[in-house]
Amino acid sequence: MAAEAEAMVHQILALPRTDARLLVAIAGPPASGKSTVAAEVARQLTLQGHKALHVPMDGFHLDNAVLSERGLLHRKGAPETFDAAGFTHAMRRLSTEDEVVLPAFDRARDIAIAGVIPVDSSIRIAVVEGNYLAFDERPWNTLAEIWDFCTFLDVPEEALSERLVARWRAHGLDDEAAHARALQNDLPNARRILARRDPARRP
């Protein structure tokens, strides 16, 4: 992942510079490595003197109680289980305002936590990562106009499946439950992301 991140850093630093904060988007299906790559890109940029911050999309998950009321808890991670309007609004603020404070997702407790990612005026590059940053459905597709750089991580479905099962095992599920979670929810979400990705991000 370090080499992939390094290539992205070269592309990002080649972009025309303005006084505005750069918004970098790293999109892809669940378990494609977005978080790892985004964190490494932000780290390498900062080491080179360009203060950058990793900004995950997952803080905009709707709460489980809301999802239960809407009959969507079993589909958590699908586009309709996020506060899409809130996320797109926050990204527009991030592109124009000196300081924006964003939520984060605590995977261990399976909840979003408000106000824990302050992006202040010293952050000149926001490295945003998430499943739906290059998703060709509204309101997600309105993001395309604000990204200064956007890339999509393509990973074979077999590899995604293995990573997803391993992820759920690491969170305490037994083998059967981990496979069920991956096959019944995560992989359908991944296929939808691949089928509906922004045409500009297709091979």
Image: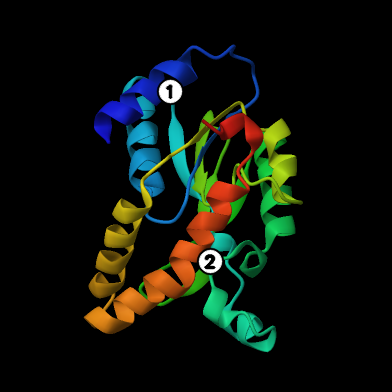
User: Residue at 57% of width from left, 56% of height from top?
Assistant: 192
User: Residue at 51% of width from left, 56% of height from top?
Assistant: 191
Q: CA distance from mark 2 to mark 1?
A: 32 Å
* Kind of residue sitting beneath label 1: His
Q: Quadrant of the N terminus?
A: top left
Image marks 2 and 1: residues in contact by CB distance under 8 Å: no
Neighbour tally class for label 2: few under 14, some 14-19, many 20 plus, Cα within 10 Å: many
The color scheme shown is rainbow
User: Residue at 37% of width from left, 55% of height from top?
Assistant: 31
* Front position among marks 2 and 1: 2
Whether residue 142 sits left or right of residue 154 in the image: it is right
Across and down, in percent, residue 134 comes to 60, 42
Where disc 2 sits, the SS reads loop
Of residue 185 and residue 54, the one placed in the foreground of this image is 185
Where disc 1 sits, the SS reads loop
- Residue 10 shows up from this direction: yes
Residue that carries the numbered disc 2 in the rendered image: 77
Neighbour tally class for label 1: few under 14, some 14-19, many 20 plus, Cα within 10 Å: some
Q: Earlier in the sequence, mark 2 or mark 1?
A: 1
Measured along the vertical axis of the image, is residue 201 above or below residue 193? Answer: above
Residue that carries the numbered disc 1 in the rendered image: 50
Whether residue 91 sits left or right of residue 201 in the image: it is right
Across and down, in percent, residue 46 comes to 37, 28
- Residue 132 shows up from this direction: no
Across and down, in percent, residue 67 comes to 62, 80
Of residue 106 and residue 77, the one placed in the foreground of this image is 77
* Kind of residue sitting beneath label 2: Gly
Across and down, in percent, residue 201 comes to 57, 33
Measured along the vertical axis of the image, is residue 98 above or below residue 158? Answer: above
User: Residue at 40% of width from left, 16% of height from top?
Assistant: 10
Of residue 179 and residue 14, the one placed in the foreground of this image is 179
